């Protein structure tokens, strides 16, 4: 089945710097790659996603890139702000038994220091 | 707000006792999911449902059962709780087809098994 590895597990940056989180996946058939942000005490929330027919997608300060050949995708946050501090999860969809199932990475705890 | 309510939000129980967690949605979405979240493992799918009385297993289904007798309710049952089932449990719904669209998560249910 699908396996998703996420790095780093923790990331500390100064306000205004950029942050990059990387994920690799194992199933070449995976075709949907979302990123979720989880704030303390809350459920994860989708912040951006990309499908396999697109190499890059941007939404204001957040961008995601996908390299299908290498089977990795990355989240880029520019001009980080303290409110970006949270745990971020990548995921990849895996077709199993006729249904797509999302497999999540282990998460990255991002701390943005003022 | 996707109209997802989880109950109870916190529960402490003893090994060997049965536990049922409830997920209630107000928007009649077809797909519902139960995930568990543990440090170092991200979110792992326990079971999911694609309609009333239609359920299937996820990655970590051993020791768990589910039921969906109404569109709006998805129940997760631990028949005989063990300490390894201490975790935070998240219910989610998807608005698209199975796992190719955005997942909306509830606030989570923290279960401690002593």
Image (tube, coloured by chain):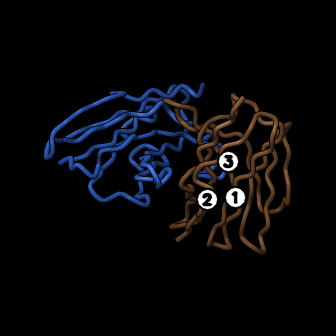
Contact check, label 1 and label 2, Cβ < 8 Å: yes
Q: Name which quarter of the figure residue A52 lies in.
A: bottom right
**How far apart are labels 3 and 2 at the CA level?**
11 Å
Q: Which residue is mark 2?
A: A6
Q: Secondary structure at mark 1?
A: strand
Total number of numbered discs in the rendering:
3
| Residue pictured at 53% horizontal, 34% vertical | A43
Q: Is residue B54 left or right of residue B62?
A: right
- The chain letter of the brown chain reads A
Front position among marks 1 and 3: 1
Q: Secondary structure at mark 3?
A: strand
Q: Chain of mark 2?
A: A
Give the quadrant of the C terminus of chain A.
top right
Q: Name which quarter of the figure residue A77 lies in.
A: top right
Q: Is residue A51 above or below residue B110?
A: below
Which percent across, then down, holds residue B22? 35, 33
| Residue pictured at 85% horizontal, 55% vertical | A56
Q: Which residue is mark 3?
A: A35
- The chain letter of the blue chain reads B
First in sequence: mark 1 or mark 3?
1
Q: Chain of mark 1?
A: A
Q: Is residue B100 left or right of residue B41?
A: right
Which percent across, then down, holds residue B67? 33, 44
| Residue pictured at 49% horizontal, 49% vertical | B50
Q: Nearer the viewer, residue A68 or B39?
A: B39
Which percent across, then down, holds residue B69? 36, 38
Q: Are marks 3 and 2 on the same chain?
A: yes
Q: Nearer the viewer, residue B19 or B11?
A: B11
Q: Which residue is mark 1?
A: A22
First in sequence: mark 1 or mark 2?
2
């Amino acid at each position: 089945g699908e396996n998703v590895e996420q790095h780093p597990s923790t990331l500390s940056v100064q306000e205004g710097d950029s942050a990059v989180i990387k994920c690799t996946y194992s199933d070449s058939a995976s075709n949907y790659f979302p990123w979720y942000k989880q704030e303390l005490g809350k459920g994860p929330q989708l912040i951006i996603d990309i499908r396999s027919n697109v190499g890059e997608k941007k939404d204001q300060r957040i961008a995601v890139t996908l390299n299908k050949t290498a089977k990795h995708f990355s989240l880029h946050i520019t001009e980080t702000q303290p409110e970006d501090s949270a745990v971020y999860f990548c995921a990849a969809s895996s077709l199993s038994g006729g249904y797509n199932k999302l497999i999540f990475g282990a998460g990255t705890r991002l701390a943005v220091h003022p | 707000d996707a109209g997802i309510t989880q109950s109870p939000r916190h529960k402490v129980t003893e090994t060997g006792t049965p536990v049922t967690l409830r997920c209630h949605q107000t928007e009649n979405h077809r797909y519902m999911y139960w995930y568990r979240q543990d440090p170092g493992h991200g979110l792992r799918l326990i079971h999911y449902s694609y309609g009333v009385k239609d359920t299937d297993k996820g990655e970590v289904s051993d020791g768990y059962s589910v039921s969906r007798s109404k569109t709006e309710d998805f129940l997760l049952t631990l028949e005989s709780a063990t300490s390894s089932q201490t975790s935070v449990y998240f219910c989610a719904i998807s608005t698209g087809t199975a796992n190719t669209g955005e997942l909306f998560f509830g606030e989570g249910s923290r279960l401690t098994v002593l």
